[in-house]
Image (cartoon, rainbow, N blue to C red):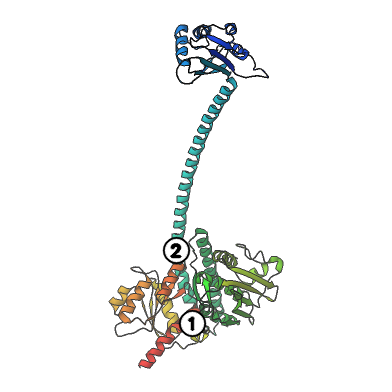
Amino acid sequence: MSMASGQFGAPPRNGVPQGLALFDGSLRLLASNARCQTLLGLKEMEQPGISLGDVLGLLAWRGDLGIGEPDELAARCLAALTCPVEAVERRESVAGRMLEFHAWRMPDGALTVSFADVTERVVAETELARVKLTLEARVEERTAALTRVNAELEIARAKADAANLDKTRFLAAASHDLLQPLNAARLYTATLVERAGGTELMGLAQSIEASLTAVEEIMAALIDISRLDSGALTAKPAAFPVGDILKKVDVEFGPLASEKGIEIRLVGSRAAVLTDRLLLGRIVQNLVANAVKYTRPGGRVLVGCRRRGARLRLDIIDTGIGFPREQQGLIFAEFSRLEQGARMAPGLGLGLSIVQRLVAMLGLGLELDSREGRGSRFSLYLPLARNPSTAAPNAPATAAAALDLAGLRVLCVDNERAILDAMGGLIGGWGCEVRIARSLREISRDGLIEGWMPDLVLMDYHLDQTSGLDAVEWLRQNLGGHLAAALLTADRSPDIRALAEARGVAVIMKPVKPAALRAAIGGLATGRAGARTRAE
């Protein structure tokens, strides 16, 4: 039990810091120490024989037992102190000090009471409680603020995701809607170039074709950068023969290099690598395109592979303009072009930036060595697959490009009439027998395949009623599963390319490069033409 006194002194430097008082069974004072007398401030505590009730009465009249009737307060405290169990109570005096009482009842009825001045401790406890309440309030405030910020971040993230989705959709639309007319223009221009050979219009036609090529490269680079920024590209590693990449290089760049008077040489490999096939193809495509672009007529480009321990090194080496060592760090910056390269070929300076970001995404190694005026070497370090392919290296496909296409039956399907007309004129100029349609419904309505078996079909991916891949499946069900097919699309999504390859359909990107298109048609038709010849 605790009570408080009106006057308190400092505890003695020596001796017991608590006040002690002993009462007999009749609750009369037997003895008390000096500290007890100082704490209570009662001279009566110096004389044995005073009753506990009288002591409490004096304290109550002085106001040390709180507010109320003194007799009632004294009686209440007496009952508390003389209870059978230990009692502990605190009382604040009119002087503002806090005294803590402990009372123990002895077996013979005697009572021992100790007194201690706990003012400082009570003040500390009160301050601690106040700090705790303040801290809890601050924690609640900070928690509420954090919850609010998290909610705002979640809203911002949702908006960002929606913006990225909108951006991805826009890019898909841009890939198709913006590149479609460019594709038609490229096809018309290619026809014009072929027909203007040897005339005064040849130079004009070639200039138009070069301008369209520059526009195509710029648009393709911008779309790739946007897809990287929006997170639309994701890596899907798988084991595949690296020779597949080299074959595509030959098909796409062989005719272009030949037209420019550049020798392109491929060194095949039996090795299989473990990475994303489509993204690796995009990296190699950009590097080879740069090599061809910045190599003068009469130069050479080498694309080949060498084993280096547990990795395969894929080299793209050219005899082009090269660049100084101190400028090598600049070539990977977006929209950065070296002066000599800018004078030699148009562009935005995004190709190598795309390469660097794709290399980082796939976790590959990239090494560069270049000498100004002598050429450059870009080396990709690829992880080898555990079970490499034992097939022979892919043979160059240049023979397909030179194949005589006369009499080849080709079905072209595209929902754009301008593209169909341009495609028909171009392929027809190569001696092919061409039939065109805008949809499966038009093929059925006009009876285009009644009594006429195409050797291959060139199918647009974005048709009005269905996808080009589903249209190819329909044709194969009606004409036979052996029908060779190529999907023409401006959509650079790896998913579409993977789905097409899974169905045995080649992919030709729009805008179509005429030389690459001819090589692809020759390669697709070789097996079909041979089978038809044997059947006849």
Q: Quarter holding the C terminus?
A: bottom left
Badge count = 2
| Label 2 crowd (10 A; few <14 / some 14-19 / many >=20) | some
Which numbered disc, 2 or 1, marks the residue that appears first in the sequence? 2
Please provide percent x and percent y for residue 277. Answer: 50, 72
* CA distance separating discs 2 and 1: 27 Å
Residue at 62% across / 19% down in the picture?
17
**Residue 359 in picture, x, y percent from top left:** 57, 66
What residue is shown at x 50% (from left), y 32% (from top)?
137
Residue 10 placed where, x, y %? 65, 16
Q: Residue 376's x, y, as percent?
A: 66, 74
Neighbour tally class for label 1: few under 14, some 14-19, many 20 plus, Cα within 10 Å: many
**Res. 306 in view:** yes
Q: Which quadrant would residue 47 be assigned to in this image?
A: top right
Q: Compare residues 48 and 447 and report the one nearer the observer.
A: 48
Which residue was labeled with disc 2?
172
Residue at (69% x, 66% y) in the render: 327
Tag 2 near tag 1, CB within 8 Å: no
Residue at the outermost front position: 108
Rendered position, 152 above or below 267: above
Image position of 61 with respect to 156: above or below: above
Camera-nearest residue between 141 and 166: 141
Picture quadrant of residue 382: bottom right
* Res. 431 in view: no
Q: Where 335 sits versus 442, above or below? A: above
Circle 2 — which element? helix
- Mark number displayed over residue 3: none
Nearer-the-camera pick, 108 or 271: 108
Helix, strand or loop at mark 1: helix
Amino acid carrying mark 2 in the image: Ala
Amino acid type of the residue tagged 1 in the rendering: Ala
Q: Which residue is mark 1?
A: 519
